[in-house]
Structures are given as C-alpha cells and as structure tokens.
Image: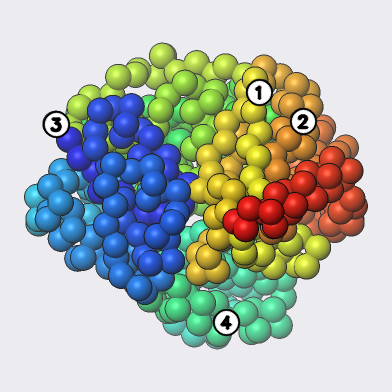
Amino acid sequence: MIRKILIANRGEIAVRIARACTEMGIRSAAVYAEADRHALHVKKADEAYSLGPDTVAGYLNAHRLVTLAVQTGCDAIHPGYGFLSENPELAEICAKRGIIFIGPDPKAIRRMGDKLEARKSMIKAGIPVVPGSDGNVRSIDEAREIATRIGYPVMLKATSGGGGRGIRRCDSEEDLKRSYDRVISEATKAFGSADVFVEKCVVNPRHIEVQILADHHGNVIHLCERDCSIQRRHQKLIEIAPSPQLTEVQRKEIGKLAVKAAKKVGYRNAGTVEFLLDESGKFYFMEMNTRLQVEHTVTEQITGVDIVQEQVRIADGQALRYKQKDIKIHGIAMEFRINAEDPKNDFLPSYGKITRYLAAGGPGIRTDAAIYTGYEIPPYYDSMCAKLTVWALTWEQLLNRSVRALNDIGVYGVKTTIPYYLEILKSREFRSGVFNTSFVDAHPELINYSTKHPMRDVAAAVAAAITAHTGL
C-alpha cells in the first residue's frame, strides 16, 4: 500500500492533498522553491524539501521530482493541477523509477492532452464534437479556407493548450489574420508546440463539465456535472454543481456521454470531460482534463466523495468503492476562486503581504487556502490564493449564503476578486440561474462596485494598528 506521497505542487492544492494524506494515515512530503519557504503547504506536510532558488524550474523538473521521491522513500507522486499534472513525461519517469503516479497512464495523458487526438477519439466513440479542421493547420491560408467553409465565428486553438491559454475567437477573416501568429507564439511559449487548429465557435454556450472516476478493474462512474459558464478570457471564476441550467434528462445524457468517453480511451483515475451546451440544447465535446480540477470541491460537497482520496486508492490498485447507483446529489454548491487581483484595473495581479486574513465559517462553508496573516503572496505564480466553497439545499439558499460568506471572509493587504463576486451575486440574470460564457463580457457594469465597506474599513484599520504595534 502507498505509505508516503510526494506532493509535486504548491499552494492550496498542495495543502488539500496533504490533508487527504493525513486522513488516510499516509505521510506527505512537500517541495518548495525558495520563494515558497514560508508557504502554508510547507507547514502542513509531514516533511518538506527545497527545490532551490529558482521560483519555477524546480516545480517543472520531472527528473528531479522523481529522484527526490526515490531518495525520500516516497511510494507515489501526486501532481495536483497545473505545473506537471498533465505532463506524460512525469508519469513515464515515475513508472521507470518504481514510483506510483497518482493520475492516468502516460498514453491517456498524451492522447487527451492533444486536442486533435481527443477529437478523433470522441468521433470514433460517437460523441458529438464541434465542427472544425481534421488536423493542425499549416498556414494562415489553410486556416482561412477552413474558416470560410465552416463559417465565422471560429476558434483558433493551440493543439496542446489548456487553462484558457492559446485560444482566440475570430469573428472575421481580419480577426483570424491578426490572431494567427499570436496564438502560435502563445502555444510555443506555454506548451512548447506551435501546432494550432480551427474549430467552429459555439456562440453563447454553457460550459458544462463532468467529473469521472475510473479504476483499473473496468469500473467507471461520474459524479455529476459542474457549470463553469462564469469565466473571463476562458479562465473560470465561479463553478456550480449541479448546474442550475440542466434538466434531469440533460443531466443523465451528459453523464452517460462522459462515462462513454472515459471508457473509449481506457481512462484510469480522476478526470473531467468538458462540454459546450449550445442554445438549442445540444452538447458538444470540448476537451478532457486528465487531472484533478480546481473546482473539484463543489462535486465533493454535493456527493460526499473525497476525490483526492479516491485518486490515491485507484492509483494503489484498489477498486472503486462506489457504483453509479450509489452517487446521490444532495443540495447545490458554488465555488469562488479568490484571486489576488484588482478587477477595477483589468484584473491586474495584486501581490504583497497579507496584513490580516479572516476565513469565512458557519453552516455549509468550506475554505481551501494557501494564505495566512503575515504571508507574502509571491509574484511568480498564479494569482489564486484561496477558494471559497458554499453549499446549501436550494439555489436561493445558496445565493444568500454565498453573499454572507463572501462578506465574512477578509483578505487585507492586497486587492481580491471578492467584491466583484458580490456584484455578480446581485445580478438578476445570475440569480435567475440562466447564464452563459458571455456573462462577464456582457456585464461590464459589475466592475463599478463601491470599495467602501464600513465593517471592512474598521477591520482593516484595526489590523493595520496591530501590525504597526507588533512590527509583524
């Protein structure tokens, strides 16, 4: 059995994995760049090992991470999300060195990480995909020809892309010309590949994804869907499970499609199958994420399944403890990504020292955070510093509880997306439960929130006084 896990990540997800290890009686080993020496994940793990002064290179060095796992007596590596989580090389090196990779096998990562290969697999499985190019486009002229054939608007996408990067919507031939070199440049820098393809743009879709679990004994189940339609520049901001926009018939349909997709590619471990739902109610396969998702928390809240612990058990060769009939939806949950950003300044990252941090609490509240009072948010990584997950029995209760929880949470010293989320929760359209991926762009007025908050101002003044007095 797995007795010790190297957590090849940082931030709140590393803290989350360490907590799962503790509950399972498994030792955890954290890794950290010098900039993360005082990070929370270093404090929460049983052991911690330095990756050196470079802020990013250590987290991206697969050989070094696996060697460290071997040297420190770890049985397995959990990659979390981001960094090397969808890198087949890490999984291959683990296999060669006798370390269990807590995720799918390299072939599945490689196949589903290549968007064109994923499309081909889904077509063979009979799962609907968005019309587009049969392969990578080799020139702007070829891209123009395909776009003319399938009709504008189109999406120009990096074949190896992910995380909302390497994607541009093109509404005309002029847009396509402007975007072509830019997307290739982004793809090359972010993913090491200049390959791009063209896909029909589904206008004003809902972004719906399905969490699946698959073991090594042929068992595959889904844990219901999540609605990720509230996003900015293809980056998710708010996630909801189950989606308030689906009928029960649609819910069953998309769940079956996700399981079918996982079985077709022989998938193992936790994964997410992402779909677009068009205005006519038709689902289209978009991509498959071969890792744990940031928003896995909402699924855990409505199903009671600890997805990280299930990942470990599956990697350890154990059969799933659940059948599809065992998965019952209880209530509804919403996750807010608390980013250290200034929405009023085009969401510019806001790094610096947390002068005071107050976590939200009360019924139905879960906080996954990488911050604490006195912590300095480094400027080298993603701006997400915490996740607030709220659960309630009904949509209306969820909305009201979310407002209360966002007002409760306090992050002082840096600007965050909290006040922006409070404005979204006031929106009639959002409260109606009917919205799509164009919501953020369609409501620029939500940025015009007031920065005045009497209780926060008092708390901030008190925090500043305490900090000045203690010299923290």
Label 3: state its secondary structure. Answer: loop
Amino acid type at circle 3 is: Met
- Residue 126: where, in percent of width, then height? 42, 42
Image point 87% across, 45% down: which residue? 453
**Amino acid type, callout 2:** Arg
Rendered view: 132 above or below 69: below
Mark 2 lies on residue: 404
Pointers 3 and 4 in contact (CB under 8 A)? Answer: no
Amino acid type of disc 4? Arg
Q: Nearer the viewer, mark 2 or mark 4?
A: 2
* Badge 2 vs badge 1, beta-carbon distance below 8 Å: yes
**Residue 467 in which image quadrant:** bottom right
Kindly report the distance in space between the C-alpha atoms of the residues bearing marks 1 and 3: 37 Å
Q: Residues within 10 Å of mark 2 (few under 14, many from 20)?
A: some
- The span from disc 2 to disc 4 (Cα, nearest Å) is 42 Å
Q: Which residue is mark 4?
A: 182
Identify the residue shown where x is 24% and y is 33%.
26
Q: Report which residue position mark 3 lands on.
A: 1
Say which label, 2 or 1, has the lower sequence index: 1
> Spatial distance from mark 3 to mark 4, Cα to Cα?
48 Å
Give the secondary structure at mark 4: helix
Rendering coords of residue 252 (x, y %): 53, 25
Tell me which residue sits at (55%, 85%) in the image.
Answer: 181
Q: How would you rate the neighbour count of disc 3 (Cα within 10 Å): few for under 14, some for 14-19, many for 20 or more?
A: few
Residue 409 spot, x, y in % from top left? 69, 39
